[in-house]
Amino acid sequence: MTTDNDNTPCFPIGTAAVMLGVSVQTLRLYESEGLLIVHKTPGRQRLYSKSDIRRIECIRHAINDEKISIGGIKRMQAMVPCWDIIGCSDAERNACAAFTKSSGGCWTYGHTHSRCAAQECRLCEVYLRSGECTNIREMIVSSTLQKQIASNERPL
Protein backbone atom coordinates (compact mmCIF):
# COMPACT_ATOMS: atom_id res chain seq x y z
CA MET A 1 0.00 0.00 0.00
CA THR A 2 1.29 3.44 -0.89
CA THR A 3 0.94 6.61 1.10
CA ASP A 4 1.01 10.23 -0.04
CA ASN A 5 4.58 10.40 1.26
CA ASP A 6 5.49 7.44 -0.98
CA ASN A 7 4.25 9.39 -4.02
CA THR A 8 6.20 12.56 -3.27
CA PRO A 9 8.82 13.10 -5.99
CA CYS A 10 12.17 13.61 -4.28
CA PHE A 11 14.97 11.64 -5.99
CA PRO A 12 16.73 13.15 -9.04
CA ILE A 13 17.28 10.74 -11.92
CA GLY A 14 20.98 10.21 -11.09
CA THR A 15 20.18 9.31 -7.48
CA ALA A 16 17.38 6.97 -8.57
CA ALA A 17 19.73 5.27 -11.05
CA VAL A 18 22.33 4.67 -8.32
CA MET A 19 19.67 3.39 -5.89
CA LEU A 20 18.45 0.91 -8.50
CA GLY A 21 21.83 -0.05 -9.96
CA VAL A 22 20.83 0.98 -13.48
CA SER A 23 21.89 3.69 -15.90
CA VAL A 24 20.11 6.98 -16.35
CA GLN A 25 19.44 5.89 -19.95
CA THR A 26 17.60 2.80 -18.68
CA LEU A 27 15.27 4.97 -16.59
CA ARG A 28 14.63 7.23 -19.57
CA LEU A 29 13.90 4.16 -21.72
CA TYR A 30 11.30 2.87 -19.22
CA GLU A 31 9.68 6.30 -19.24
CA SER A 32 9.67 6.59 -23.04
CA GLU A 33 8.15 3.10 -23.32
CA GLY A 34 5.30 4.15 -21.02
CA LEU A 35 6.21 1.78 -18.19
CA LEU A 36 6.21 4.66 -15.72
CA ILE A 37 5.28 8.30 -15.44
CA VAL A 38 8.00 10.46 -13.97
CA HIS A 39 7.31 13.79 -12.29
CA LYS A 40 9.07 16.68 -13.99
CA THR A 41 9.76 20.01 -12.34
CA PRO A 42 9.03 23.27 -14.20
CA GLY A 43 12.72 23.16 -15.19
CA ARG A 44 12.14 19.66 -16.71
CA GLN A 45 14.19 17.84 -14.04
CA ARG A 46 12.96 14.29 -13.50
CA LEU A 47 12.15 13.42 -9.89
CA TYR A 48 11.29 9.93 -8.66
CA SER A 49 9.18 8.98 -5.65
CA LYS A 50 9.48 5.93 -3.40
CA SER A 51 6.57 4.33 -5.27
CA ASP A 52 8.38 5.02 -8.59
CA ILE A 53 11.44 3.23 -7.19
CA ARG A 54 9.29 0.21 -6.22
CA ARG A 55 7.68 0.20 -9.69
CA ILE A 56 11.12 0.17 -11.33
CA GLU A 57 12.25 -2.64 -9.02
CA CYS A 58 9.20 -4.60 -10.19
CA ILE A 59 10.07 -3.87 -13.83
CA ARG A 60 13.67 -4.95 -13.25
CA HIS A 61 12.48 -8.17 -11.56
CA ALA A 62 10.18 -8.93 -14.50
CA ILE A 63 12.95 -8.34 -17.03
CA ASN A 64 15.87 -9.98 -15.23
CA ASP A 65 14.28 -12.78 -13.21
CA GLU A 66 11.06 -13.58 -15.08
CA LYS A 67 12.60 -12.92 -18.53
CA ILE A 68 9.67 -10.74 -19.60
CA SER A 69 10.44 -8.20 -22.32
CA ILE A 70 9.44 -4.56 -22.19
CA GLY A 71 6.78 -5.38 -24.78
CA GLY A 72 5.49 -8.16 -22.54
CA ILE A 73 5.31 -5.83 -19.55
CA LYS A 74 3.39 -3.27 -21.62
CA ARG A 75 0.96 -5.99 -22.71
CA MET A 76 0.41 -7.02 -19.08
CA GLN A 77 -0.17 -3.40 -18.09
CA ALA A 78 -2.71 -3.10 -20.92
CA MET A 79 -4.67 -5.99 -19.36
CA VAL A 80 -5.25 -4.11 -16.10
CA PRO A 81 -9.03 -3.51 -16.09
CA CYS A 82 -8.93 0.22 -15.30
CA TRP A 83 -12.57 0.58 -16.37
CA ASP A 84 -13.60 -1.80 -13.57
CA ILE A 85 -11.32 -0.21 -10.99
CA ILE A 86 -12.59 3.34 -11.51
CA GLY A 87 -16.15 2.31 -12.39
CA CYS A 88 -16.60 3.49 -15.96
CA SER A 89 -19.98 3.11 -17.59
CA ASP A 90 -20.27 0.85 -20.65
CA ALA A 91 -20.39 3.93 -22.89
CA GLU A 92 -17.27 5.45 -21.30
CA ARG A 93 -15.43 2.15 -21.48
CA ASN A 94 -16.30 1.51 -25.12
CA ALA A 95 -15.19 5.03 -26.11
CA CYS A 96 -11.85 4.75 -24.30
CA ALA A 97 -8.62 3.77 -26.06
CA ALA A 98 -7.43 2.02 -22.89
CA PHE A 99 -10.26 -0.49 -23.41
CA THR A 100 -10.17 -0.77 -27.20
CA LYS A 101 -6.39 -0.95 -27.69
CA SER A 102 -3.81 -3.17 -26.06
CA SER A 103 -0.45 -1.49 -26.43
CA GLY A 104 0.11 -0.23 -22.89
CA GLY A 105 -1.33 0.79 -19.56
CA CYS A 106 -4.27 3.19 -19.52
CA TRP A 107 -1.92 5.99 -18.45
CA THR A 108 -0.24 5.89 -21.90
CA TYR A 109 -3.38 7.18 -23.65
CA GLY A 110 -4.52 10.78 -23.75
CA HIS A 111 -7.67 10.94 -21.67
CA THR A 112 -9.10 14.24 -22.86
CA HIS A 113 -12.82 13.44 -22.92
CA SER A 114 -13.35 10.95 -20.12
CA ARG A 115 -13.67 10.85 -16.37
CA CYS A 116 -9.88 10.43 -16.25
CA ALA A 117 -9.22 13.76 -18.00
CA ALA A 118 -9.24 15.76 -14.76
CA GLN A 119 -6.92 13.42 -12.89
CA GLU A 120 -3.14 13.24 -12.99
CA CYS A 121 -2.37 9.70 -14.17
CA ARG A 122 0.69 9.24 -11.95
CA LEU A 123 -1.55 9.71 -8.89
CA CYS A 124 -4.45 7.58 -10.18
CA GLU A 125 -5.40 4.45 -8.23
CA VAL A 126 -5.01 2.29 -11.34
CA TYR A 127 -1.46 3.49 -12.01
CA LEU A 128 -0.40 3.26 -8.37
CA ARG A 129 -1.85 -0.22 -7.82
CA SER A 130 -0.33 -1.57 -11.02
CA GLY A 131 3.13 -0.59 -9.81
CA GLU A 132 3.28 -3.45 -7.33
CA CYS A 133 4.46 -6.72 -8.88
CA THR A 134 1.70 -8.93 -7.50
CA ASN A 135 -1.11 -6.42 -8.02
CA ILE A 136 -1.24 -6.67 -11.81
CA ARG A 137 -1.99 -10.39 -11.71
CA GLU A 138 -4.49 -9.97 -8.87
CA MET A 139 -6.36 -7.16 -10.67
CA ILE A 140 -6.64 -9.18 -13.89
CA VAL A 141 -7.74 -12.37 -12.09
CA SER A 142 -10.27 -10.49 -9.95
CA SER A 143 -11.82 -8.82 -12.99
CA THR A 144 -11.99 -12.15 -14.84
CA LEU A 145 -13.65 -13.88 -11.88
CA GLN A 146 -16.19 -11.07 -11.51
CA LYS A 147 -17.13 -11.41 -15.17
CA GLN A 148 -17.50 -15.18 -14.83
CA ILE A 149 -19.72 -14.79 -11.78
CA ALA A 150 -21.82 -12.14 -13.53
CA SER A 151 -22.28 -14.32 -16.61
CA ASN A 152 -23.34 -17.30 -14.46
CA GLU A 153 -25.96 -15.15 -12.68
CA ARG A 154 -27.70 -14.15 -15.90
CA PRO A 155 -30.99 -15.94 -16.50
CA LEU A 156 -31.07 -18.38 -19.39
Image (tube, rainbow, N blue to C red):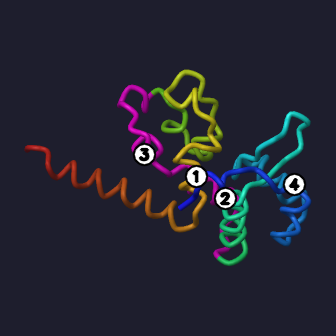
Q: Earlier in the sequence, mark 1 or mark 2?
A: 2
Q: Which residue is mark 3?
A: 85
Alpha carbon separation for disc pair 1 and 2? 8 Å
Q: Which residue is mark 2?
A: 51
Q: Amino acid at mark 3?
A: Ile
Front of the two marks 4 and 3: 4
Contact? badges 2 and 3 (CB < 8 Å): no
Tell which residue pokes out farthest to the bottom in this image.
65
Look at 29% across and 50% down and name the residue there. 147
Tell me the CA gap for discs 1 and 3.
12 Å
Magenta-tinted stretch:
66-94
Question: Marks 4 and 2, Cα distance to the nearest angstrom?
Answer: 14 Å
- Is residue 118 shown in magenta? no
Q: Earlier in the sequence, mark 4 or mark 1?
A: 4
Which SS class for mark 3?
Answer: helix
Classify 93 as above or below 156: above
Residue at mark 4: 12
In the shown orientation, is residue 12 left or right of residue 97?
right
Residue 86 falls in which quadrant of the image? top left
- The label shown at residue 128 is 1
Q: Nearer the viewer, residue 142 or 115?
A: 115
Marks 1 & 2, CB-CB < 8 Å contact: yes
Q: Nearer the viewer, mark 4 or mark 1?
A: 4
